[in-house]
Image (cartoon, rainbow, N blue to C red):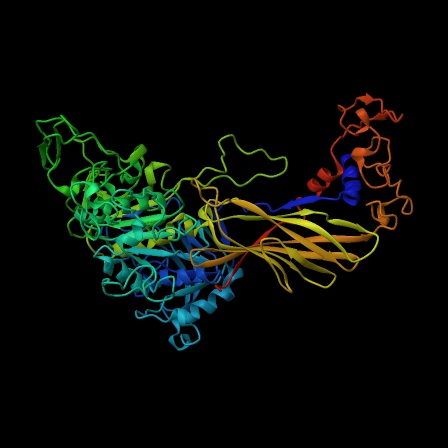
Amino acid sequence: MKLSKLLFAGMALCPALALTTVAAREARAEDRTFPAGSLIIPMDQAYQAEGIYQSYGLLFHLLREGVPVHWVIESDKVWHGAACNTAGDLCAWDCAEEGSGVKCPYPTASPDFFAGAQVVWGNPAKGATIKNHGYRGGPFVVDAPHRDKALEIVNAWNDQSLWGQNPWADRATFQVVTVHEATAPFTADSKKELLAAPTIAVFADGNEDIATAYLRAAGIKQSNGAEFPAAKCGAGTCGPGTTNPDLLTVPSVMGNMGTCDAPNQNHKNGALFTPEGLPAYCQIMSMHWNVADRELVQCGGGNCPATPEECAGEPITYHGHEVVAEVRSFLQYPTHFFAECQAVNAYENAVPNPAWPYLDDPGRMGHFLTTTGNPPPCPCNPGPDEGDFQCVVDGCGPGKDCCLPKDIKERGAGFLIAPSPSPIKVLRPDVPYMQFDGFFAPEGGSEPAYNLSTYLGTTYKNDRDVTFITATDGPGKEDVWMSGYMDGTCDVDPPPPPPKFTGDEAPPKSFNPEASCGGKVSYLGGHSYTGKAGQRLFLNALFEADCTSESGQPRMGLSLTGELVVAAKSLPVERGYVVGYKNEGSGPALDAVLRALHAASGLEVVDAKMGTVSAEGGSWALGAVSGTISQPNDPAASGSRDATLKFTQFGEHVLNLDIRYRVGVSNLSSTMNVTIRVLLDTDADGVPDETDPSPNDPASCGDSDMDECDDCKSGTFDPGNDGCGPSGNGGSGSSGGASSDPAGCGCHIGPASTSPALLLAFSLLGLGLGRRTRRRPR
């Protein structure tokens, strides 16, 4: 018998089945044709000068409201370091209208794509036509199918008269964001498809007002909907439980540290994590944490005594090294950490100290991007431009005198402090981090730039290319802007993984769907870039993080195990089912709720173990669901819940499964519809009349497993107990063999020994696919 006939026969007889969704393809940079009607948010100064920062706020709210946005960046773009109108060094592209011959009076990268458009909002004037412009600086594009929903958000963002109905758009700093609508299809390289608006934490390090100024300029708010404050934090004004919950203090980040005599070494119990131990934020940023504060440990609110016994029972109230540990644990997931100025060395140069009062374990290591180096033995003879070193007695352990930097901010290097480079060298204009248009000037401050140390032998981990803005002799010398995955696990812009494979397709040998790069780290030298190009780099980093795009998202699959064909002699009838869920993406799903809903009469959920039953159906509050990136003691990435369904009518019934969850401040869901057929079974043998050749004889219903014995010989459908096969237990002999049945039925095991239940599962894998949808925030 052909397999197709077996599948057909199995569909009528199979009592159980598991349906599972197929995970979505990974996002990848690819040429994509956007149709006319697609919306373009320009990110170059020709059309987006005043509204450049608020473009990121608009992007945030588009994602928050469920509108996917493409970050379009040409993979082969180049940076033109001189002003484009420099005589003898003109750019090959024009500033605004292509073909005008007018060059920009500032440096730019080459265009990401060319398109004609009409102005919806902003520059040059609403309704104006742009014949052909080379859009630069990493523009954002909303595909035409999402145009109408996106325009509602754009209009509310740009029209202050609509703020009363849309309070999320109300903001202290207001600029109109230019938006164009494509008048013809265009092809461009979608570097990233952004899907979720990030949750953002700012470390209250004494200079948090630099970060909040960047965020206020963009119009990006806290998770509670309040604007980030303009002023620095005061006593009791910041942290969980305050009006500024996303401004995190040292005690909130470090979590419960225990007591002097019983210290807590849990590096995932601070405010960066949910109670389940998963990241509570997509991003955290620290603008100028002082190295001296990193080295501070306090017991009972004051200085710690000489020994832990002297403060037994007193709580450890401040521990700078634990902040580093919590951030390191946070970066085990697809998250992002941004540091500026002295905060760079506060984290990067941190090394564990096992002595009291630190009592550090290896988890308190900084060095997210750089190696620790090897301090040479005394005497000290550093080369030119290697910094100031001194011989420290026992500096590298008892009896090990060695050369260490004189400046405490450079101890543990890592990084040495360097002056601002002039001129600068721009690398990798093709990565999202490096999208800007115009001049970039490094800033001053206590740490304007960073050097690796030849004297100490420090390098970027795994020799990764993490430097984007540096001196002409860089990388490694006067580096200003660096980004990479923690511990050098991957290149900062790795090629996207291949898609999931199904059916007979074979994935390449190098493909590992469980592999992940973890979290990203970005460092920017200089004190403050308010209103300057460095502010764009900060905002780029917010949305470049994997937790905003497909690569760091959950991918929730759903399943239903139970009878999809219910054979019933009479009604009502009840059946038990198992509703399953599985996260096949790298990012966690937070606040997840699983539901089984009935759409019409004739079907109802009458019991939901560990959940609740309502008129709509059953629901289960799951809490957090881990992704493929998980750590010991994290919540499970999959699970199931039991439900009992009651059928009161014959026919087809649709059960809707969905799982709702949160990523950042975006609320998402995955859904799947399953059709269950309830059919008359007059003889109650478990086989519906419509496929039972003997509907009035419970001992006869056919031979689905081709063993030449009736599957209902026992009085009910049971192919494994129809008297065939070795020892009369059916179907366990080898393919093609024969056996003698004690009951006298010599049965032949056919060429396909697969059970009808399994065959049916295979046949319907493509019929009940889950569908990921996006919803407005609840």
Let me know if residue 357 appears in the view: no
Q: Nearer the viewer, residue 767 or 717?
A: 717
Q: Quadrant of residue 465?
A: top left
**Residue 505, percent from left and from top:** 60, 35
**Residue 423, percent from left and from top:** 18, 46
Relative to 575, is 73 on the left or the right? left
Please tell me whether residue 586 is drawn above or below residue 728 in the rendered image: below
Q: Quadrant of the N terminus?
A: top right
| Residue under the point 83% across and 30% down | 707
**Residue 82, percent from left and from top:** 23, 50
Q: Nearer the viewer, residue 772 or 119?
A: 772
Q: Exactly how many numbered labels are in the figure?
A: 0
Please tell me whether residue 462 is drawn above or below residue 590 in the rendered image: above
Relative to 206, is 152 on the left or the right? right
Let me know if residue 345 appears in the view: yes
Please tell me whether residue 457 is drawn above or below residue 335 in the rendered image: above
| Residue under the point 39% across and 69% down | 169
**Residue 648, percent from left and from top:** 77, 60
Q: Quadrant of residue 246?
A: bottom left
Q: Nearer the viewer, residue 315 or 393?
A: 315
| Residue under the point 75% across and 30% down | 753
